[in-house]
Image: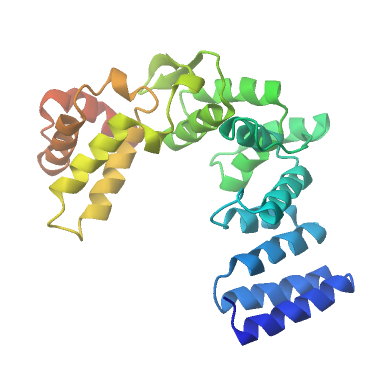
């Protein structure tokens, strides 16, 4: 429920939008949101940003909504924003994840822009979130081929590999994909692989870590961050390395404290040596 001040700002934004002054409408809505979160205000802001040709900001705004599919107005705006940004890959992910129940008419960027996206990505020393999002503008064959190359890059970091793997999973890719994990050549089939937070090995591992720190709540965020880092180095091939998630959690805690990882000593040394490099 929006308060009186927010209602007044929403009214002013509506008047500005009706007059075609989308920038003024944007400013009014942003001011209203500074007074407190409201889904209706955010949906209005995303629409005004899109109309003002600020498609990337519109994408960020609509993504802050907790549910993109239950309400028709939100679902429609989300689709229009994907189309405005040429985010074909995300539209295909939505189609797969909803079993074809939600489809959006989205075209990829033109060939020249796609080539520029790939060129800029390859030249970047550190990939930003915005640069990564630009890959969503590629057509499917180009995206898949580039994703394969990223997963075989010996200089790639685990965070990028994890993001690429999960995007291929969301696409429902049924091809076998090769990738490097700790310098070793591995393979997985995205369509047969759960997302990280849905993986039973990961969930058991994180639950075990959390239980060991239940009486030390101030230390819990740090150990969970370490756990996510260590596990992320192995995903999506964690089952090739971890036979007992609880034992791996215990070994990680010991390794971080005393450099003693027991049965997982060599694996943990490799994980943290790679990070040091």
- Examine the rendered structure and indicate whether residue 105 appears above or below residue 180: below
Question: Between residues 150 and 126, which one lies in front from this camera angle?
Answer: 150
Residue 276 in which image quadrant: top left
- Examine the rendered structure and indicate whether residue 93 appears above or below residue 179: below
Which residue does the image show at 30% across and 21% down from the upper left?
Answer: 239
Question: Between residues 30 and 203, which one lies in front from this camera angle?
Answer: 203
Question: Between residues 91 and 102, which one lies in front from this camera angle?
Answer: 102
Residue 110 in which image quadrant: top right
Give x and y (percent) for residue 247.
14, 30
Counting the numbered discs, the total is: 0
Which residue does the image show at 63% across and 59% down from the upper left?
Answer: 61
Give x and y (percent) for residue 112.
82, 32
Residue 133 in which image quadrant: top right
Give x and y (percent) for residue 107.
79, 35
- Examine the rendered structure and indicate whether residue 51 appears above or below residue 159: below
Please identify the quadrant where the C terminus is shown: top left
Which residue is the extreme one toward the right?
19
Q: Is residue 243 left or right of residue 120?
A: left
Q: Is residue 42 left or right of residue 202?
A: right
| Res. 152 visible in picture | no
């Amino acid at each position: 429920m929006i308060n009186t001040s927010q209602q007044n700002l929403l009214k002013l934004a509506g008047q500005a939008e009706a007059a075609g002054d989308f920038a003024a409408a944007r400013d009014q809505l942003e001011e209203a949101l500074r007074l407190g979160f409201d889904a209706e205000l955010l949906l209005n802001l995303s629409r005004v940003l899109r109309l003002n040709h600020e498609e990337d900001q519109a994408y960020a705004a609509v993504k802050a909504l907790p549910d993109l599919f239950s309400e028709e107005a939100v679902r429609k705006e989300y689709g229009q924003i994907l189309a405005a940004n040429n985010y074909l890959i995300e539209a295909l992910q939505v189609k797969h994840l909803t079993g074809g129940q939600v489809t959006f008419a989205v075209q990829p960027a033109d060939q020249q822009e796609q080539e520029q996206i790939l060129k800029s990505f390859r030249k970047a020393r550190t990939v930003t979130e915005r640069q990564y999002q630009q890959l969503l503008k590629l057509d499917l064959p180009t995206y898949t081929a580039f994703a394969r190359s990223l997963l075989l890059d010996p200089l790639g970091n685990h965070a990028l590999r994890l993001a690429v793997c999960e995007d291929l999973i969301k696409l429902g890719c049924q091809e076998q994909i090769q990738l490097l994990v700790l310098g070793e050549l591995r393979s997985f089939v995205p369509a047969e692989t759960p997302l990280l937070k849905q993986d039973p090995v990961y969930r058991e591992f994180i639950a075990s870590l959390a239980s060991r720190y239940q009486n030390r709540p101030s230390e819990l965020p740090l150990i969970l961050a370490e756990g996510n880092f260590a596990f992320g180095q192995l995903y999506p091939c964690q089952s090739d390395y971890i036979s007992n998630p609880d034992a791996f959690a215990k070994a990680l805690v010991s390794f971080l404290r005393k450099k003693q990882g027991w049965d997982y000593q060599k694996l943990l040394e490799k994980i943290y040596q790679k990070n040091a490099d």
